[in-house]
Image (cartoon, rainbow, N blue to C red):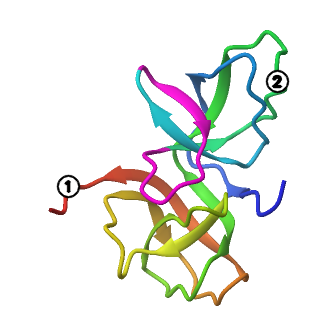
Amino acid sequence: MANELTLVFEISRPIPMTCADGTGIEKGAILKLADPMTASAAAALNDIVGGVCAEEKIASDGKVKVGVYRRGIFKATASGSITVGDPLVVSGPTANNLIQTAGVNAEQIIGISLETATNAETFLFELNPTVMQLA
């Protein structure tokens, strides 16, 4: 998988979320949250962020739970310019890239940038999924 997130500092342990048995999810993938506490790979701008996949989920392996990080310091890939302190969202359509929230309806925050980065550069950010109603 390209641009997977890499755990640098574990702030809290992963929690189990429901996932589809027939779905494969790579370790380090950003996950979309759906009801009831169900995770799948995120790929679109404004996906509700569930967290980051803590383990490889092999398609049709019989498992319907996957470990998900909701907090931690991760290394990610920038899509465009990011400044330290920027709130971040999933870039979409490129999976696992992050962008700053300026110029987008940034209601589905994945976390806060801990470093400044340019396009395609890796940087550290604090994972802390947050939803805000801005409109």
Q: Nearer the viewer, residue 41 or 52?
A: 41
Residue at the spot 42% in from the left edge and 46% down from the top edge: 48
Spot occupied by residue 1 in the image (x, y as percentages of width and height):
84, 53
Residue at the spot 81% in from the left edge and 34% down from the top edge: 56
Residue at the spot 67% in from the left edge and 25% down from the top edge: 66
Q: Is residue 113 above or below residue 21?
A: below
Region rendered in magenta = 36-49
User: Can I make out residue 49 in this image?
Assistant: yes
Q: Name the residue that disc number 2 marks.
A: 59
- What element does badge 1 sit on? loop
Kindly report the distance in space between the C-alpha atoms of the residues bearing marks 1 and 2: 35 Å
User: Can I make out residue 13 in this image?
Assistant: no
Work out which residue is located at the far front of the displayed protein and give it.
93
Q: Classify residue 13 by image quadrant.
A: top right
Q: Residues within 10 Å of mark 1 (few under 14, many from 20)?
A: few
Spot occupied by residue 81 in the image (x, y as percentages of width and height):
56, 89
Horizontal side, residue 107 vs residue 33: left or right: left
Q: Amino acid at mark 2?
A: Ala
Q: Is residue 77 above or below residue 1?
A: below
Residue at the spot 61% in from the left edge and 35% down from the top edge: 40
The quadrant the C terminus occupies is bottom left
Q: Name the residue that disc number 1 marks.
A: 133
Q: Is residue 120 above or below residue 11?
A: below
